[in-house]
Image (cartoon, rainbow, N blue to C red):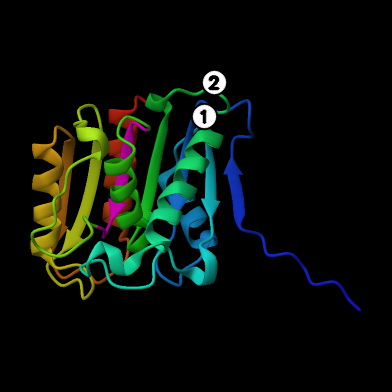
Amino acid sequence: MTPQTPVVRLREAGQPRGLAESAGILLHGRSRTKQEMLDLATGLEIGGTRWLAPYADQGLWYPGRFMEPLESNEPFLTRSVERCHRLVQDASEGGRLNPQQLFIVGFSQGACIAVEYAMRHPGSCAAIVVFSGCLMGPAGTDWHPAGGKALHGLKVFLTGSDMDEWIPEERTRQTAQVLADLGADVEMRVYPSRPHIVSKLELAEAQEFLRSRMLMP
């Protein structure tokens, strides 16, 4: 019997472990690929960074839509957030890199996980880049960080569109407001007529955001 080729659940790029000056976790969208996120990392051109790109089981971080009750996406949602946390811990290299040198970049579903991670593990990373993502749960959800901690010090680059078929502009703006009210430093961009993609413009603006806010080369 020919053994099956093992599925690679994590890919890395950039600086190797032990030499990186910062580390970024890359979270793909629904049914997308980790390679797609590595391509985005190349576009960000952040020198000195170790990139970690995980792959969700069956390409899904959670099975339903982000506006459904949180319980309907469990236990997958919590498992995905905790997997992200393990990767953040791995990226810290046992404390060699502190939280101010760690950040998360997500697209779509992955961006929603990035926001959920920041809410459940405040203080664990310096920044999140949220490409077409938002807070999860229906209107009226109690959005507060775990343990009652505020999000002071967290830097957020949040993008959306007035024509995104998956993320309504209203939820993008609501997410920015909630995160800012909780103390995060939020930069929001709503791009006119932009479909559900990461455009060259927002990639360039995200690059500038990370370089200026995290003092990267």
Residue 130: in magenta span: yes
**Where residue 77 appears, x then y in whole percent?**
38, 59
Q: Is residue 92 magenta?
A: no
Lateral position of residue 28 relative to residue 205, left or right: right
Query: Does 73 appear above or below 89?
Result: below
Q: 89 above or below 165?
A: above
Residue wearing tag 2: 96
Q: Residue 116, labelled with which disc? A: none
How far across and how far down the image is residue 170, in percent?
8, 62
Q: Is residue 94 left or right of residue 60?
A: right
Residue receiving disc 1: 92
Q: Is residue 129 left or right of residue 60?
A: left
Q: Are marks 2 and 1 in contact (CB under 8 Å)?
A: yes
Instruction: Tell me the element at label 1.
Output: loop
Q: Residue at x 61, y 26 (%)?
A: 19
- Could you classify mark 1 by the number of other residues whose Cα lies within 10 Å: few (under 14), some (14-19), or many (20 or more)? many
Q: Label 2 crowding class (10 Å Cα cut-off): few <14, some 14-19, many 20+?
A: few
Q: Quadrant of the C terminus?
A: top left
Q: Secondary structure at mark 2?
A: loop
Q: Residue at x 77, y 68 (%)?
A: 5
- Chain part drawn in magenta: 125-133
Q: Residue at the spot x=25%, y=32% of the render? A: 154
Residue type at mark 1 is Ser
Q: Position of residue 141 (x, y in %)?
A: 13, 57
